[in-house]
Image (tube, rainbow, N blue to C red):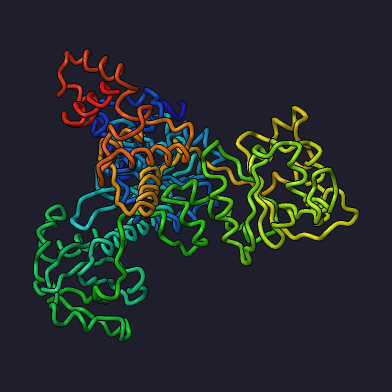
Amino acid sequence: MSSISAHLKEIENVAAGRPSSRDGLVVNSWLRCLNEYRLDPSQRGNAYIVPGAKLREHQQQAEELIRISRAALDHLYEQVAGHNYVLLLSDARGVSVAHYRNPKLDPALRDAGLYLGADWAEDRTGTCAVGAALVSRQPITVHQDDHFDPAHIGLTCSAAPVFDTLGELVAVVDISQLRSAVPRSSQQLARHLVIATARRVELANLMSQAEGHWLLRLSRSPDFIDSDPEAALAVDGDGRIRGMTHAAFTALSQRIGLTEHSGTALIGQPIDTLFDLDADTLDQYRRGQSARDRILYAGGQPRLFASAEPPATRAPRTIRRPVAEPRADMPASLARLTGGDETMTRLARRAARFAQRDLPVLIQGETGTGKEVLARAVHAARSHPGPFVAVNCAAIPEHLIESELFGYAPNAFTGAARGGKRGLIEAAHGGTLFLDEIGDMPLALQSRLLRVLAERCVTPVGALESRPVAIHLISATHAPLADRVARGEFREDLYYRLNAAVLKLPPLRERADFDALADTILDEIGAEHGERYQLSRAARRRLAAHHWPGNVRELRNALSVATALCEPPTIEVDDLPDEIGASTGRIGLEAQLAECGGNVSELARRLGVDRTTVHRRLKRLRTH
């Protein structure tokens, strides 16, 4: 009997009520798939990745969760990356809104659904770790043929739910492998790690939400009580509970006889109804004394160790602008570029390593992705940055580029300055030379640049002697240099010298931090004009749906136009450029109005704006 046939036979036995040796959570999920969702275990399902615009909606709604989770997820991925795990953070609907993976495995991961935007809701994909954790509200490992759908039998996944401070399930942390060692016990560590990570995310969320409140950490052991407690509560100045982690909900509900799902009844309760503790005695549990002496009792219940942190000792947290938050694992100039996008975070980490070496760096990316911005960030991250000299090889006429780069000796040619001129390479001595669009550099100059890199000296045009230079070279291109090499337009030896330390910028349409990036650009524009700008929900949706062929540069230009047209502080859809906004012009808007039978309210509903906006846009377009 084949493994698929045996799998189907076992599911049939479970459906018939026969006993199974599988995890009870898996068995219950199988039964839901059969009886509630009417799924067929003999049919292989394809992974479903939500469209880009839909993914951005999910990410926008989970923006604060993604920001708060980042440190815990980074730590988890560092622990498992070497074992070919993929890390997913899924929202409460089962859609992955953040993921960490080895990009080399992307085709296989996308096919398997271990990818950003994958929908792992149980009613769609059958028994899986994310879906089962959402329904059962418990951690689970779904190993190989624990999966309901035969398409997923090769996978192994461990997941744990994440709850907010009021006990609502808001996310699932999952780590998965395309292939794994048997037996199932090999995933015990993975399950432990996702549970610990979910607990850390909940604690970070509680700390973020508990501004102005005491934070009370609890553990059965004094070890790590201050840094990694088992449970935690937020307590206000009157001694009432204002929020807690899920472990606290579970433990305290059991203490007073509540079901776990009625744990919200604990919110607002005085802390002295649960512990021998009140608002006046919280101060006794601060870190000033040994953790072993901070013992908390609750009637006849087992003792706990406690750590109380007053509100004044925690720095205020800002929900917005994850781009501006410093990261301990990379220089600030690079941290500002990450914005919550995993690809950008890994690129920034890679760039930080390159910044401390004298390796030539090659930045690849479509037009407008921010290649010079990244180059300046790498430069700023160096121990001794020195000058930054930027040269656009495509913008300087071919007959001038040699003298601009290398300089020239006195009277080197007709029209040359009497005293000669220092070239841009020499001007970058002790710092960084950034050569943008290096693929457009003439072949003759490529050989001279290769000599500069090899010999670390530069010879001005018309000069007999070379001058030593110490430069860190960063080059950039929007087109694959390998194609130019194949066409004989770029030197192969220079290509291999440049192509070692490569940083590839993702296009804007593939970045998960679109909202944070747009908000940051608005802040920068606002600072220039002494204004504060914000996007309406409809305008934000419209921007998210655009393809952005011009990437970040196009986004910045669009927002500059919008801020000029809007009535501050709010940018509406009709303030956006026509190629991005509600229509492509008067004819397009009139045609849509005709389709709606002249009903302005219906057109407004279609466009996601109000009636006033439609009237105003029609009036403006008809006037012009």
Residue 376: x and y, percent?
57, 54
Q: Quadrant of the N terminus?
A: top left
* Viewer-closest of 505 and 529: 529
Residue 73 shown left or right of residue 386 in the figure: left
Residue 21 in view here: no
Q: Quadrant of the C terminus?
A: top left
Q: Residue, x 21% and y 58% (percent of image)?
A: 165
Q: Residue, x 60% and y 36% (percent of image)?
A: 478
Residue 546: x and y, percent?
39, 31
* Viewer-closest of 559 and 274: 559
Q: In the displayed structure, would residue 199 be above or below residue 270?
A: above
Q: In the displayed structure, would residue 421 be above or below residue 385?
A: above
Residue 303: x and y, percent?
22, 77
* Viewer-closest of 230 and 238: 238
Residue 444 in view here: yes
* Viewer-closest of 22 and 417: 417
Residue 210 shown left or right of residue 225 in the figure: left
